[in-house]
Image (cartoon, coloured by chain):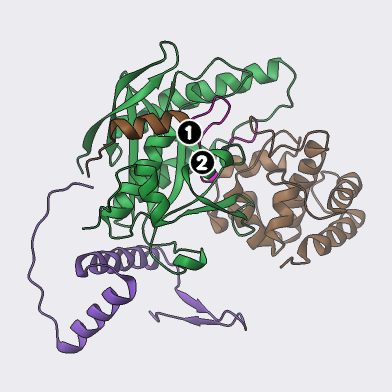
Chain colours: A brown, B green, C purple
Amino acid sequence: MKFNFTPEWYNSALKIESDDVTVGAGMFAMHPEFDESVMRLGESIEETRIAFGQFVSLARRKKKVTIEELARVSDLDLSELIAIEQHDGHFIPEPRTVYQLANFFKVSYEKLMEIAGLTKLRHPGLTTHALRFAARSASVAELTEQEQRALEEFAVVLSEQTK
Amino acid sequence: MSSDISNVLLKETATGTLVAAELFNPVADQQITDWHKLWRPERDRRVDTLKATGVPQASWPQSSHWNWERKIENIQALLSYTSVGITCNGETQGLMSLGFSAHRGRLPAQLGCELVYVDYLEVAPWNWKDVRFAQPKYSLIGGLMIGAAIQISFEQGFKGRVGLHSLPQSISFYEKCGFVNMGPDSTYHFLPYFELMTNKANEFLKQGENHEI
Amino acid sequence: MSTVKRTMTLNLTEAEMDVLEGLCVKKDMSKTAVLRQALRLYQLIEVRIEKGNKLYFEDALSKDKAEVMML
């Protein structure tokens, strides 16, 4: 359709615009690198994000699924999954990816989003659990007993569904 | 599908004057190309600038490119969606996609009523208002987009009702437009959900009378 | 949204017309607007089902799911 804006409209609209507000809506317009209200300054985002990557990697291997299979079954991008599992803490996953992974591993989406550093921390103690998990697990081909135990404990924390 | 093109005005920051711009509905292929060829590189350049100044590093996932393309494919193929693009000086300055079917009113006065849902609204990186970078080239894009969403809502028989999830930094803008802030939505990444009622929609358009078909 | 429109004559039964008119009153929308919404929803459902998705109603209280369309 065609649109019509009157001179009066432009006058009012100019008053609504302000110098410091960027207009945006919807998750596709989010750019966490720039958005300090989403980024948690002073918190150990990168460290919890390492835990996120490690969780995905270990939980996947525990289920005996390859990255390719995980990508296919969850309808996710392979290169993104690889970047996530490298868990250097710098890679920011897509919200939809976190959602699909939460469904696949049957854990709380809200908590996984916090660990992935995409939303504000809301669950007290979650960061501590994540950091502890990250410290106890390491990247090896087979899950060691220690890794299994660490994974199980962290998975329980993540699974407690919030209402 | 061919686009309807309307003449609109943007405020050019450098000169402080209103300049001619075009509003496309739906979005044309060139605007999608601009997102890839103009917006993303500028965004990446800004990320690199931040990295150089020591702001914590991050990388934009490759898959966002793929997801956005899929999203646009869906928008173009389905009746449930439409899109709006604003160009000026041959470049795309803003993009928006709207949904008609998957959302209903949440405000008590319009609970369950059909409305237009803004599922994506973004302005080009060079129009962002960020003190760490240069002044925005153009403004008024957000206002035009909301105005377009409201006009579409009237056209569809939805009486100007609009719903959206605001980015954290845009909250004061939607409040000024007359939207009701219904608070963080735990079902949508805790982004605040805003909704516009008919009387406020009319006020925003400043035309006094309804646009019902 | 091209503004070019094509016209169609629609033949509905009494019962169908009653339902259509009832929806119009309930939603305070014209017949065209209501049918447009119906068509949009129909297309959306078809596309998702073709992809292999299923359509469910979920009971608000019990969270029980009931499949809407059996294929």
Q: Are marks 1 and 2 in contact (CB under 8 Å)?
A: yes
**Residue B49 placement (x, y as % from top left):** 63, 16
Which stretch appears magenta?
A: A16-33
Q: Residue furthest bottom?
A: C15
Q: Nearest the camera: A13 or C19?
A: A13
Is B49 in the magenta? no
The N terminus of chain B appears in which quarter of the rendering?
Answer: top left
Name the residue rendered at 25%, 38% in the picture. Answer: A4
The C terminus of chain B appears in which quarter of the rendering?
Answer: bottom left
Element under disc 2: helix
How many tags in the picture? 2
Name the residue rendered at 83%, 37% in the picture. Answer: A44
Q: Chain of mark 2?
A: B
Location of residue A90 with respect to A26 vertically, above or below: above
In-image side of B66 versus A46 (left or right):
left
Residue position for label 1? A16
Mark 1 closeness class: few <14, some 14–19, many ≥20 residues within 10 Å: some
Residue position for label 2? B176
Q: Quadrant of residue A138?
A: top right
Name the residue rendered at 85%, 62% in the picture. Answer: A152
In-image side of B188 versus C39 (left or right):
right
